[in-house]
Amino acid sequence: MIIKLWLFLLLLFLSIFGKAQETAKGKVSDSLAETRSSTTNISEVIIQSAPRKIKLNEGNLVLSVAGNKDFKTSTHLLDVLRKTPGVTVDQEGGIFIGGRITPAVFIDGKPVVMSSEELQAYLRSLVPEMVESVEVNTNPSSKYDAEFKGIIDIKLKKNVSLGWKASYNGNIYVNKFNYRENAFSISYHTGKVTYNLQAGYNEGISTYRYHALQRLANTNIMRTQTYQEDFGKAYNLQAGADFRLNDKNRFGISLKGNFRNNDRIRSGSLYTTDKSETLVVLNTASENPTDYSQDNYGMTTDYSFQNKGFKLGFLGNYLSVKNKQNDDFINRDQDATDVLSYWKSDLINKINIFTAQIDASQRINNIDIEAGFKYSHSDTNNNIRYDTLSVGSQFVFDPTRSNVFSYKEKVWAGYLTFRQKMGNLQINAGLRFENTNSISNAITVDSVVSRNYLKWLPSLSASYIFNKSSEFSLSYSRKITRPAFSQLNPFRFYFSPLNYWIGNPYLLPSFTSQIKATYRYKKWVTSFTIGKEKDVMTRYPLYNPKTNVLEYLGTNLPYRNFAMLETSFPVRVTKWWNITSQIAGYYNYEFRPYLDEVFALNIYNYEVRLNQVFSLPREYTVNVFVNYESKTGNSLYIIKPRYTVDVSVQKSWFDNKLNTKIGFNNLLDSYEQRLEFRHKQIMDNRFTHWWDSSRLVFSLSYNIGSSKYHVKEIQKTEEENRTR
């Protein structure tokens, strides 16, 4: 049904604008003439006119970062993404687009193979002046992996200067405790080879609180309190070289390592009273010290060949991750301090991921044809052992909670895309296949799940440029989302002694079909997305009234319908006061079977962001960022409204070589997440997550370099960049 609707809209669109092609050709010629006239030759460097702060690339929002006043006070790229239209960054550094979609992150058009912690550390090491632009793609075509429901492509500024350049970036976050981030980068460019080295060291303490209130089946009232201090250290090192062999061939290699240690202390209590809250039924205290470490290594190689209209590229990635974690779970009687229960866990998790892909493209007049193949192999092994303190004060192996689980996945994929430009109209069509072969093996419980399936995933889009001020695009895509390892692994992850979630090895992949329309008028960008997801992967709570244990289990929902309307526009109040407004509205309808009933609700919510920039005398820049999220949720839970206010000041020194910033994130400490179970007849439960995101921030970055000569570089047109 969605495909038929999309084709109808596309035919209608073509019939309306088909007669405008001849006129559009004349406009394009005039536009190209104006572009050529704006080219300036300075010391053998050809520089085109300054790019717009915001534009569309095949319907995707492209935002300039370096030199953009809206981001002058941003401490790093994660801070920039928080202020980017259509992008959300939560308290723990998680990145989301289009509501709650986790995007793939690309650097210069190539996917980044990093763990989530390593990615966040890398993004924090990039100051705004190191980034040329950010492109937000919420409806990727068949060229990209089908699991990519969204992509954020970060284009770094190139070092085209002969000689060396270096930079340092340091951030200090201060509240009850403090956290420090240090990043250093250096590059050396010879004209034929560019060498680069990046190193970082982060350490400090972060805190977290969890509060829950639950009315039990016997009418008692139970309150859960959890407080956590996490002291972490992280080291990272990345070195690489890019070889320009000749005008047609280029080769690059990069090696990286990331090492992390966390000592966590979690303490809490379970306080239960009768219905009147006058008689104490149970009062226990819990301790959960944890020692966690992660070591990961990676290597990336890429090669490209270009001759006239033909291009060939190879990209290979390897990532090895090893996680180790030791936990103690101690529960005592609060009054008598007697040990009620004591168990230990010892976890070893190993992940190996290898990917290789080949892409080839050929330009024939105004037609681009591109094809590619990709192979990926991931191997994940998890061994968690629980030992429980017995009556005789001896720790005994606990087979009910211990788990050995492995997951192997191979994916063969290929795609073919077609692009043609006819005047101001551009058509893109693509078809992708992906064959998935996976085996999950829960050795402890003797459960093996094997899957082998082939899926065809089409995409289609059209974009039309009316003039310099306005353009429109319409696109359709079909995507697949495979279960993550944590969703499949049937081991317990504890929030408290009576609260944990557990994976489901029988989860199925989900499939999403969606249509997106985007319109830009000058700097005002509006997009509308509508779609349907089948076999939605989610978690649901299961309460045991006899033991008062609350489990969160994984399952597939039959389907959900969704829609999003997003708009962003700048307002220049005065010469020194600019406001960028972002408004987004969301619709979600879940068909959720749960406990022999079906719950299906229409959920509407919205989000408003205001990014205000004040350019003051003596080159001071002040930024006030406000974000409000309305009440939202799903068929089972209500998520309460929340908001945040950030304030920051920036000042540059010594011809912009030294950059200093001071700010206060989450000024009012108002960004906690509060949830409440909707259906009180099943379970009366409400809880709050709080992270210490309310912090005073000091930031310093310094750039040095000895280059006085420049390499001749001609900037490519947008059409040439699209064929890379």
Image (cartoon, rainbow, N blue to C red):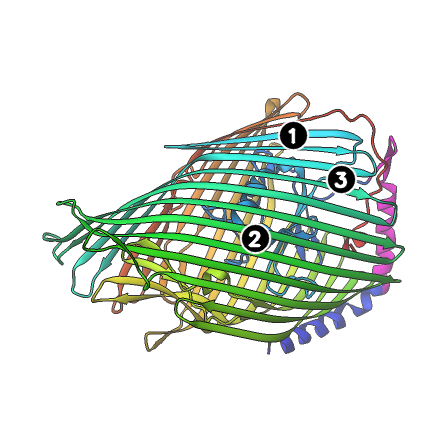
| The quadrant where residue 98 appears | bottom right
Answer with left or right where residue 192 lies relative to residue 604. right
Position of 465 relative to 207 (above/below): below
Q: Main secondary structure of the magenta part?
A: helix
Give the CA separation, mark 2 to mark 3: 24 Å
Residue 46 among magenta residues:
yes
Give the CA separation, mark 2 to mark 1: 30 Å
Give the CA separation, mark 1 to mark 3: 24 Å
How many residues crowd around disc 1 within 10 Å: few (fewer than 14), some, or many (20 or more)?
some
- 436 and 225: which one is in front? 436
| The quadrant where residue 621 appears | top right
Of all residues shown, which one is farthest toward the left?
A: 279
Residue 366, visible in the rendered structure = no
Answer with left or right where residue 264 lies relative to residue 466. left
| The quadrant where residue 199 appears | top right
Q: Looking at the picture, which amino acid does disc 3 mark?
A: Ala
* 2 or 1: tag closer to the N-terminus: 2
Q: Looking at the picture, which amino acid does disc 2 mark?
A: Gly
Q: Give the residue displayed 43% in from the left and 72% down from the top.
A: 447
Q: Looking at the picture, which amino acid does disc 1 mark?
A: Ser
Position of 358 relative to 416 (above/below): above
How many residues crowd around disc 3 within 10 Å: few (fewer than 14), some, or many (20 or more)?
few
Q: Are marks 1 and 3 in contact (CB under 8 Å)?
A: no
Answer with left or right where residue 369 lies relative to residue 11. right
Residue 342, visible in the rendered structure = yes
Residue labelled with disc 3? 50
Q: Position of residue 382 (x, y in %)?
A: 46, 58
* 2 or 3: tag closer to the N-terminus: 3
Which quadrant: the C terminus?
bottom right
Magenta stretch, residue numbers: 22-47
Query: Which mark is on residue 167?
Result: 1
